[in-house]
């Protein structure tokens, strides 16, 4: 969602490249580009005005550090101000522990509030906090059924009393049930409403008074831009909220909501929805979001995604197989499915430093297509062929049979086998050389030596071609002792 914003910021950095220092004259054009970038992203005008003023003051008062170019220093100033604008740090959900933590979910119609309630319940379950969903939306057709279905999907109980009961009484009874069952957190899903619907707003206030929630989270659609900030402020003035959940952050919104909410409403964004799947909810970290906006990726989120999916014991076994060149098609298939669980290829690329604007949508789509082709061909292999890829290298008849079974040509299968053997050899060499990366997520055979522009492999995933990050921001070098030690401690092999 931040592609256009990132490109505009890139134009700002270019105006300072090659300069000896930051001055009043050369900073004007950079600030003009920053202002344009934020306004085009639908950030509130007053927020933009204050932001640019703060950046200008910091930049003019900054002394150029030896060895740091003016454009790099300016990036750092903008990054720091973006973090401050969005709230400095993540504000986690309250955990009262002594009694059920009560979370009241509110929002307009169509913002994805019911789905966000289920996503939050699953997020809490992953943190080993028990949760219960309470269905009080008795107005929208099938709203209660939707919540029940989502509850079954994530194995979280749903308390409901049908559509004839009073929402206030349902909420009170649900919390009583949660206390009786010893549930840690109760999430009360309320009916969607309109700002102008005072009767519905009054009902929400009655529910809040009756259950006295520890958190009141407003679910806001990121596609509404700066209007999301105004909406948050209005709900806070009428109802009183503690934070917001910003949904549809994976869409084509321009980012204005994420950059305006805290400043306008005074309330933090606590979570962001990044997809339709029930797993697609992340805590909101201002520093990580600032990195994404500036095209620097978000390695921490990428690692957290991998940690959720990777089994440490499996990773250690896989590392041994790679070092001994025993990595087979079963392992490859398992790793591609693991990556799918982490999200789309496009989403993963955006988290890798320097990659957010490097690949076009067509190139990423091509990568997704090639992965599906590889999976189809592997699924047409026998168990023996998956475990021993060398059988295919020496048998044209086997390759022909696989080609017929998968619906592809003999040349496609031959290329898959050839690329796989090259990749296996390269992964062994890299493992012995101490290259860092996520376990098992090396280059992908059948993709012509790597996706276009990726330097011969999937960057940052155990293959060469990642390249440097953004100017002025350093990470661990791939082969450093500190890097190896950290990855090993987390259960990540050095591939």
Image: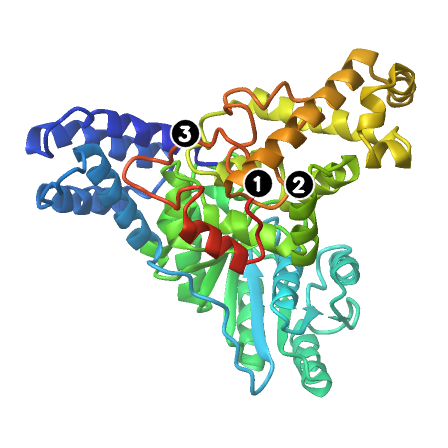
| 434 shown above or below 316 | above
**What residue is pinned by disc 2?**
322
Q: Which image quarter holds the C terminus?
A: top right
Of tags 3 and 1, the one toward the viewer is 1
| 396 shown above or below 159 | above
Give how far across and how far down residue 271 sits, in percent: 51, 57
- Residue depicted at x 76% and y 55%: 141
| C-alpha span from label 3 to label 1 | 38 Å
Give how far across and how far down residue 3 sits, in percent: 44, 31
The part of the image, by quadrant, that contains residue 133 is bottom right
Q: Which is nearer the eye, 240 or 392? A: 392
Of tags 2 and 3, the one toward the viewer is 2
Q: Which mark is residue 4?
A: 3
Q: Which is nearer the eye, 80 or 466? A: 466
Residue 24 visible to an observer of this rendering? yes
Q: Judge left or right: residue 412 versus residue 221.
A: right
Residue 345 visible to an observer of this rendering? no
Q: Which mark is residue 431?
A: 1
């Amino acid at each position: 969602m931040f592609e256009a914003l990132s490109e505009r910021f890139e134009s700002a950095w270019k105006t300072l490249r090659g300069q000896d220092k930051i001055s009043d004259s050369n900073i004007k054009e950079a600030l003009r580009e920053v202002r344009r970038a934020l306004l085009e992203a639908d950030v509130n005008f007053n927020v933009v005005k204050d932001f640019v003023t703060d950046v200008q003051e910091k930049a003019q008062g900054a002394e150029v550090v030896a060895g740091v170019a003016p454009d790099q220093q300016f990036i750092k100033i903008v990054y720091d101000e973006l973090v401050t604008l969005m709230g400095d740090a993540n504000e986690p959900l309250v955990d009262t522990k002594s009694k059920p933590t009560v979370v009241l979910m509110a929002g307009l119609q169509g913002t994805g509030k019911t789905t966000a309630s289920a996503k939050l319940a699953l997020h809490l379950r992953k943190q080993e906090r028990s949760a219960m969903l309470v269905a009080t939306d008795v107005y929208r057709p099938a709203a209660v059924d939707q919540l029940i279905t989502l509850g079954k999907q994530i194995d979280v109980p749903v308390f409901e009393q049908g559509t004839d009961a009073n929402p206030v009484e349902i909420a009170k009874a649900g919390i009583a049930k949660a206390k009786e069952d010893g549930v840690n957190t109760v999430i009360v899903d309320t009916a969607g409403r309109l700002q102008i619907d005072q009767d519905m707003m009054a009902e929400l206030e009655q529910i809040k008074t009756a259950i006295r929630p520890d958190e009141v989270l407003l679910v806001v659609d990121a596609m509404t831009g700066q209007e999301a900030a105004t909406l948050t402020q209005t709900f806070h003035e009428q109802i009183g909220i503690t934070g917001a959940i910003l949904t549809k952050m994976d869409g084509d919104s321009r980012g204005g909501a994420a950059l305006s909410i805290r400043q306008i409403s005074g309330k933090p964004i606590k979570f962001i929805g990044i997809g339709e799947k029930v797993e697609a909810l992340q805590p909101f970290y201002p520093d990580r979001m600032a990195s994404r906006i500036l095209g620097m990726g978000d390695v921490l989120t990428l690692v957290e995604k991998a940690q959720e999916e990777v089994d440490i014991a499996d990773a250690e076994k896989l590392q041994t197989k790679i070092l001994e060149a025993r990595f087979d098609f079963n392992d490859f298939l398992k790793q591609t499915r693991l990556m799918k669980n982490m999200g789309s290829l496009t989403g993963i690329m955006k988290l890798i430093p320097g990659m957010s604007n490097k690949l076009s949508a067509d190139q990423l789509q091509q990568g997704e297509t090639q992965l599906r082709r590889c999976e189809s061909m592997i699924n047409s292999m026998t168990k023996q062929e998956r475990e021993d890829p060398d059988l295919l290298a020496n048998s044209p008849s086997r390759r022909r049979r696989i080609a017929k079974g998968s619906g592809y040509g003999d040349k496609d299968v031959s290329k898959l086998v050839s690329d796989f053997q090259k990749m296996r050899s390269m992964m062994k060499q890299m493992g012995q050389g101490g290259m860092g990366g996520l376990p098992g997520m090396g280059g992908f055979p059948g993709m012509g030596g790597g996706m276009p522009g990726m330097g011969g492999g999937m960057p940052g995933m155990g293959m060469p071609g990642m390249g440097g990050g953004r100017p002025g921001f350093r990470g661990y070098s791939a082969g450093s002792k500190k890097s190896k030690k950290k990855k090993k401690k987390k259960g990540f092999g050095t591939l």
